């Protein structure tokens, strides 16, 4: 195989708690995350040597500042492979939208390179989280999952409902570093207790929380209004992903999500996407000793 094309899916944080700031500068979190059926597109082609990255549209750098580029370098160094790759990255996930686009691109590069060279992706979640990014283990693991630590401690969900997402975007860029800085954590917070089994949408309603949302909506009140419009248009649950600025509405079917999308458009919000939540059977990364892989499937 000389080339491979992959989806680099967006993710949504259904729950995001920031528990404390650690002495190493990282933050301890608790999150329930799910990948979506929509995202960036990554095309990889073998080349003799070196990494060449092309990005369209050019909304992010095409050099070592791009995590996808560094992921390719990491792969060749980690597995001692004398080779190179040309990466064509088609960006669809907005930058600074809380959907993990950069980390997902990097994870897709790692998955694709492992397939091209026919080797198992034997990586430590802890090591890759520190060296490339805290969201990388999730994008290389099962979905949905509970994430702890800095995001590298993953616990697969045993049973999860089939969800459809209506994502509503804005032109607002929210700096993750600024959002963390605005939390002003003065003491360690207690995490909520999350179940392993969710029979339906009603099981999720009492858990939807995002610690960044109060600050983000205070800074940009129009985003709070966007959330209310999602609810008004029929979303059973509405919330914010990551540190913003994307808001999501949850629906039980594609039909109801698309009807809400049409209603939002009439209210002036046209930058939207309907996507299904992914339920994948198993992680690519090894689980820590003692962990188990839950058996999951569409409900």
Image (cartoon, rainbow, N blue to C red):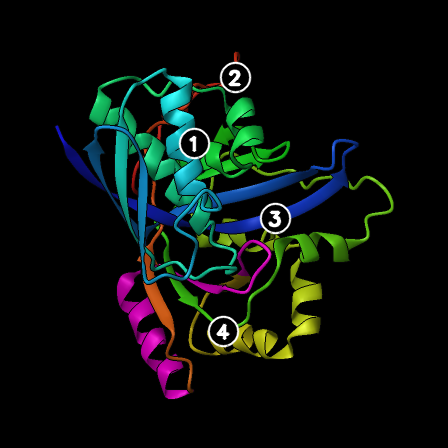
Name of the residue lying farthest toward the front: 49
Whether 6 is drawn above or below 214: the answer is: above
Mark 2 residue crowding within 10 angstroms, few (<14) / some (14–19) / many (20+): few
Q: Are marks 2 and 4 in contact (CB under 8 Å)?
A: no
Q: Residues within 10 Å of mark 4 (few under 14, many from 20)?
A: few
Q: Which residue is mark 2?
A: 288
Q: Is residue 162 above or below residue 123?
A: below
Query: Dot 1: few (<14), some (14–19), or many (≥20) neighbours within 10 Å?
Result: some
Q: Which residue is mark 3?
A: 16
Name the quarter where the C terminus is drawn. top left
Q: Of circles 2 and 4, which is in front?
A: 4
Report which quarter residue 193 is drawn in.
top right
Q: Say whether disc 3 or disc 1 marks the residue closer to the N-terminus.
A: 3
Which numbered circle lies on residue 158? 1
Q: Secondary structure at mark 4?
A: loop
Q: Is residue 244 magenta?
A: yes
Q: Position of residue 296 (x, y in %)?
A: 35, 32
- In the foreground, 214 or 6: 6
Looking at the picture, does residue 14 appear above or below residue 138?
below
x then y, percent, for residue 111: 31, 31
């Amino acid at each position: 195989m000389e080339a491979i094309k992959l989806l680099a899916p967006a993710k949504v944080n259904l729950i995001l708690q920031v528990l404390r700031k650690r002495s190493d500068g990282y933050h301890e979190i608790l999150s329930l995350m799910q990948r979506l059926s929509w995202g960036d597109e990554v095309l990889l082609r073998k080349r003799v040597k070196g990494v060449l990255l092309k990005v369209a549209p050019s909304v992010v750098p095409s050099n070592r500042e791009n995590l996808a580029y560094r992921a390719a370098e990491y792969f060749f160094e980690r597995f001692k492979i004398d080779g190179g790759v040309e990466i064509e990255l088609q960006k669809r996930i907005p930058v600074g939208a809380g959907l993990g686009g950069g980390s997902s691109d990097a994870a897709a590069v790692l998955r694709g390179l492992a397939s091209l060279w026919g080797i198992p992706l034997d990586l430590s979640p802890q090591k890759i989280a520190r060296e490339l990014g805290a969201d990388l283990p999730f994008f290389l693991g099962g979905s949905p999952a509970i994430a702890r630590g800095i995001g590298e401690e993953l616990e697969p969900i045993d049973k999860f409902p089939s969800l459809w997402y209506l994502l509503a975007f804005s032109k607002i860029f929210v700096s993750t570093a600024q959002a963390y800085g605005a939390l002003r954590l003065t003491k360690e917070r207690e995490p909520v207790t999350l179940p392993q089994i969710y029979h339906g949408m009603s099981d999720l309603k009492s858990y939807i929380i995002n610690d960044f949302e109060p600050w983000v909506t205070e800074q940009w009140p129009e985003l709070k209004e966007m959330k209310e419009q999602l609810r008004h248009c029929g979303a059973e649950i509405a919330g914010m992903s990551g540190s913003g600025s994307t808001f999501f509405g949850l629906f039980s079917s594609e039909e109801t999500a698309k009807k809400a999308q049409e209603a939002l458009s009439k209210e002036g919000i046209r930058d939207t996407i309907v996507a299904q939540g992914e339920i994948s059977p198993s992680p690519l990364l090894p689980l820590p000793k003692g962990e188990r892989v839950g058996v999951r499937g569409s409900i």
